[in-house]
Amino acid sequence: MTTPSNKTNSGNFFEDFRIGQVLAHATPRTVTEGDIALYTALYGPRFAVQSSAAFATGLGFEDMPADDLLAFHIVFGKTVPDISLNAVANLGYADGTFGVPVYAGDTITTTSTVIGLKENSNGRTGVVYVRSRGVNQQGEMVVDYVRWVMVNKRDAATPAPAEVVPDLPKTVPVAALKVPAGVSFDSEAYDTVLAGSPHLWDDYTPGEKIDHVDGMTIEEAEHMLATRLYQNTAKVHFNQFEQAKGRFGKRLIYGGHIISLARALSFNGLGNACKLVAINAGSHCNPTFSGDTIHCWTEVLEKAAFPERADVGALRLRTVATKDLPCAGHPYKDAEGKYLPNVVLDFDYWVLMPRR
Amino acid sequence: MTTPSNKTNSGNFFEDFRIGQVLAHATPRTVTEGDIALYTALYGPRFAVQSSAAFATGLGFEDMPADDLLAFHIVFGKTVPDISLNAVANLGYADGTFGVPVYAGDTITTTSTVIGLKENSNGRTGVVYVRSRGVNQQGEMVVDYVRWVMVNKRDAATPAPAEVVPDLPKTVPVAALKVPAGVSFDSEAYDTVLAGSPHLWDDYTPGEKIDHVDGMTIEEAEHMLATRLYQNTAKVHFNQFEQAKGRFGKRLIYGGHIISLARALSFNGLGNACKLVAINAGSHCNPTFSGDTIHCWTEVLEKAAFPERADVGALRLRTVATKDLPCAGHPYKDAEGKYLPNVVLDFDYWVLMPRR
Amino acid sequence: MTTPSNKTNSGNFFEDFRIGQVLAHATPRTVTEGDIALYTALYGPRFAVQSSAAFATGLGFEDMPADDLLAFHIVFGKTVPDISLNAVANLGYADGTFGVPVYAGDTITTTSTVIGLKENSNGRTGVVYVRSRGVNQQGEMVVDYVRWVMVNKRDAATPAPAEVVPDLPKTVPVAALKVPAGVSFDSEAYDTVLAGSPHLWDDYTPGEKIDHVDGMTIEEAEHMLATRLYQNTAKVHFNQFEQAKGRFGKRLIYGGHIISLARALSFNGLGNACKLVAINAGSHCNPTFSGDTIHCWTEVLEKAAFPERADVGALRLRTVATKDLPCAGHPYKDAEGKYLPNVVLDFDYWVLMPRR
């Protein structure tokens, strides 16, 4: 005699979200040296701070910090079962800041707060805005960002909630950028030869465009290893049997995988952009699939000095990634302002870079 | 002037095994945080005890334990060069128990004892029953199980040994299940929100069937990375040049890879099944290959309380995995009791689950 | 208003090298347990010293050492952006020695010195000889070797430099081989059962040829994960979009990947060859691609005892790897002394092996 079960998570639908609602996400995740090594194998980053404990502790870091995007992906992954299991599209990011560095041994726990709701005119979907925050075992913030996703309604007949669209900053203000405590980037501590680039904050100019030259082809095994490492459960990345029947016929690659590839490729031209400190905006302009080769280029959007810091400044960058299209010509948008079909990522963020 | 060499291991044939024979397997293996991270990347498990050091130590574990199946695969891998290098088929498992948790830094050493021998009527093969036992550097048992394999004879003319078929329990008795020492699962310690499921031991009913919904497609690189990680040397998993000439034309996937995928997928519906404590039986019903998408479902077979433990109970589960077949209909056997062609795993095991 | 940027590394051309020039390579790299686990997953090595902390410390090692080739690949990877980004071919290795063992936590930093320059008669390329040296955070040498590469000239019109071809030893002399300090391989410490082979130094004979039997097929994801793990940036391994237009139409596999596969496969026949101590010569005879199955065989070239060491000796080995060709017949060169088309590696090296 068998009993039907309803113990699986079917995710939240648009109707399930309420303004002010706090979602405590499963599963806390201890970051280890194993995760850091896998991150290196998956993307090939070469930034010295995240590659060498000797280099990092020489600057005043407690240990070699994990890549900031590894922390971001883990926090993002946690939000999927509660926020985006029934999502149609990941629409955007804003107001993201990185807090204390994540070291091997730290345990990250994530919560999200619903800060906006807007039903679409078709009555079948709505946009949910959440602020997600990952903290370490001491409760210190490691990453905090807003994203908004289009989520299916369970029932089109449910009346629309009151529309709340949060007022989000176009750019994270410089005063909100966090330079890690106790860390010095002055030229005696920060060796540009070991870091692999002679170009420092002083050398970059707003408007400057850098083609990062190299390309990296993505394999199914790679993006699935990455996405499982982040415990991200979004179905579209893993199930070819299901995806074969869908619009693309293929597994979609987690957008964060492209961010990490682009960041690693950007070393060639931005070798001293040693730490991400904020995400201003991000758009996954077109889908990517196994077999696509990712190239990218960066425009320097803005430079900011920190009061009382002569050793380090911030650069606001826009990194644009493409599929199967080298970036010497800085491909971006067409005459109508629409992303070119081979552009897959438009990522606006702040990095720290040592000054002369 | 050259000399022929015969220093390679050609494995044991059926004639080489004797009842009572003890095989000390090479190579001892230190489990590290790197292995644990790779396990996460390969399967995507989300059980909180194995994901968060803070969660695990909060319950009384010394540290974040490795997934029980990681220990199982490592122990299994060690037995391959001595037991199953000349195997035709892995026929079954029984009487498997998990002992002390495995933590990063522990070194596992494996021995097997031959407990049964039965030549097949064709005179060319025989069944070897072994009890394999992995211990840590303190000699404490981490996993102990029986498996039986069909092994080729070196020479069909060798007379058959006396037939010994061990009397194996259909199910590991509840008294033999080991709750980790010093660990409490009471509701003050065990946070079901962080664990990702509100359903506890009390909520499951024998006969209940759970479709775990999600599917995961397997790539060649993934199962080979996994199988090498376990230092499992079975040739059929790695050598496409040879396999291309064989029955399937493809590399076969290590059966344990499917067990781990099914266990990870079963989180969706069994999120608090926080530790495997026994393997009652297991069958790799049909072969799996790269490109197959694995789904699975579970039937609750039995519930057991522990005397003197109000905080935790055991569930006996049957998890059935399929290839390219979603499991809403709980696919299993046909009218004649034969496994359906898409059923690839029938796994009968005990798990621990916190009680209300 | 945009500004063109020239901050990317275009690598050195033949004209940029000077005899005596020292290149300090970015990026220092801390080796962790994560890297060691990935190395195991990528190749499946089973040598007990590198697999078990208990086994290694029982011999007197401080901890479980990383595979010597992991250290080699990391050092090699560092040299790529400065030495071989514009290379046409990696021509050879010589005079390589392994120094102190690398343990998890060690940070490796690499420098190269230009020791030879020879323009080719076509005027468009030249051969650069460099001695590369990786040291740990205490400045102790972990690996030191010479390689020579054919590098493009920036401008064929540049006059040729004075030709300097270094005088390199055909074989690293026995006196230069480093047995790790404080380590004993005597039979009370070194357990051949746990190590997986009964054959010790005394049992091998110069001229002996060992077919390692097993084959391993390579996937794109695997060699790219490996090569990124080593932070090796050579474009030909990663960019299918570009390679599709090239001579082979496919990504080339990093030659060191084949060395590591062959070393892991050689366990079957050389299970007690527990540590590489020197690289005498190496040639990547033919390119390898995803889908190729690697087999290998080894000839014992020479045996050497160490004065004052009765516990351990050295074997000089030639391991030859093939693609899609089993090695029972020891395939090597044709009648004219040319490598057979399926031979992909000819590797001449010294290993340590315990004595009876």
Image (spheres, coloured by chain):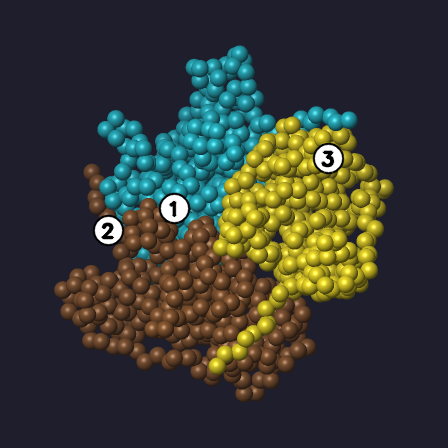
Chain colours: A yellow, B brown, C cyan
Residues at marks 2 and 1 on the same chain? no
Which one is in front in this view, the residue at disc 3 or the one at disc 1? 3
- Please determine whether, in this image, residue B158 is positioned above or below residue A172: below
Question: Which label belongs to residue A268?
Answer: none
> Which is in the foreground here, disc 2 or disc 1?
1
The percent position of residue C111, horizontal first and vertical second, equals: 56, 34
Q: Residue placed farthest to the right in the image?
A: A307
Task: Measure the alpha-carbon separation of dots 2 and 1.
Answer: 24 Å
Give the crowd class for mark 1: few <14, some 14-19, many >=20 residues within 10 Å: many
**In this rendering, position of residue B210 left or right of residue B109:** right
Where does the C terminus of chain A fall, quadrant-wise?
Answer: top right
Above or below residue B222? Residue A47 is: above
Q: Please, which residue is most extreme toward the left here?
A: B157
Asked if labels 3 and 2 share a chain, the reply is no
Label 1 residue SS: strand
- The answer to the question of whether label 2 and label 1 lie on touching residues, with beta carbons closer than 8 A, is no
- SS at circle 3: loop
The chain that hosts pointer 3 is A
Q: Are marks 3 and 1 on the same chain?
A: no
Q: Which residue does the numbered mark 3 point to in the structure image?
A: A337
The structure residue drawn at horizontal position 85% and vertical position 41%, both measured from the top left corner, is A307
Residue in the picture at 24% in, 62% down: B152
* Left or right of residue B109: residue A296: right
Point 77% across, 57% down: residue: A117
The amino acid marked with disc number 1 is Thr
Q: Are marks 3 and 2 in contact (CB under 8 Å)?
A: no
Within 10 Å of disc 3 (Cα), the crowding (few <14, some 14-19, many 20+) is few
Q: Nearer the viewer, residue C88 or A278?
A: A278
Kindly identify which residue carries mark 2.
B6
At a point 81% along the width and 49% down the height, the residue shown is A168
Chain on which label 1 sits: C
